[in-house]
Image (cartoon, grey):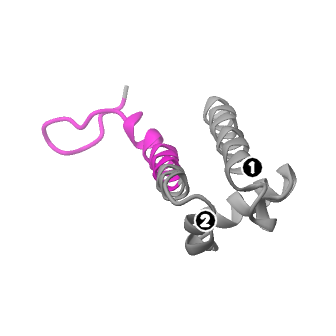
Amino acid sequence: MKAFVITFFIYFFAFSQLAYLLFGSVLTAYSSFVNTIESLFSMALGDFDFHAIQIAQPILGPAFFFLFMAALALALYCLHYHPVLRLPPLDSTGDFSLQ
C-alpha cells in the first residue's frame, strides 16, 4: 500500500506540474501550483470545466484531461483489485483452500 501511495503522488504531482505549465498563464484555477493541485483534486472528484481547458489549450488541453482521467481510473482500479489478486486460488470444489 505504501508503494501505491508513493507512486500515486509522484504521478499526481507530475500531472500537477504539467497542468500548471499548460494552463497557469491562462486559467485562474491553475495560476499557482497550490491552486493547480486543488483543481486536479476537484477534477478527480468530478468538478471540472472541460470547455475552459479546451479553450486554454485546444490540442494539449483535451489530451491532458483524458490522460489524467485515464491514469486516475487505472490507479483506482489497481487500488481496488490488487488485494483480490492476492487471494489464495480456489480448489476444485469452489472453496478457498487454507494454506
Q: Quadrant of residue 3?
A: top right
Q: Position of residue 5 (x, y in %)?
A: 67, 38
Residue 83 part of the magenta-drawn span: yes
Would you name the residue on which mark 1 appears? 20
Q: Position of residue 18 (x, y in %)?
A: 67, 43
Amino acid found under the numbered disc labelled 1: Tyr
The answer to whether 94 appears left or right of 39 in the picture is: left
Which of 27 and 87 lies nearest the eye of the viewer? 27
Residue 45 part of the magenta-drawn span: no
Give, as a single range, the part of the protein colored magenta: 69-98
* Quadrant in the picture for the C terminus: top left
Q: Quadrant of residue 29?
A: bottom right
Residue found at x 38% / y 37%: 85
Q: Crowdedness of circle 1 by 10 Å Cα count: few (<14), some, many (20+)?
A: many
* Quadrant in the picture for the N terminus: top right
Element carrying mark 1:
helix
Element carrying mark 2:
helix
Amino acid found under the numbered disc labelled 2: Ile
Q: Position of residue 11 (x, y in %)?
A: 63, 38
Is 14 placed above or below 74 here? above
Residue found at x 61% / y 61%: 44
Residue 77 has which mark? Answer: none
Would you name the residue on which mark 2 appears? 53
Which of 91 and 21 lies nearest the eye of the viewer? 21
The answer to whether 82 appears left or right of 2 in the picture is: left
Q: Position of residue 42 (x, y in %)?
A: 69, 66
Residue found at x 64% / y 74%: 47
Which of 91 and 36 lies nearest the eye of the viewer? 36
Between the residue at mark 2 and the residue at mark 1, the CA separation in whole angstroms equals 12 Å
Is 13 placed above or below 24 here? above
Residue found at x 28% / y 33%: 89
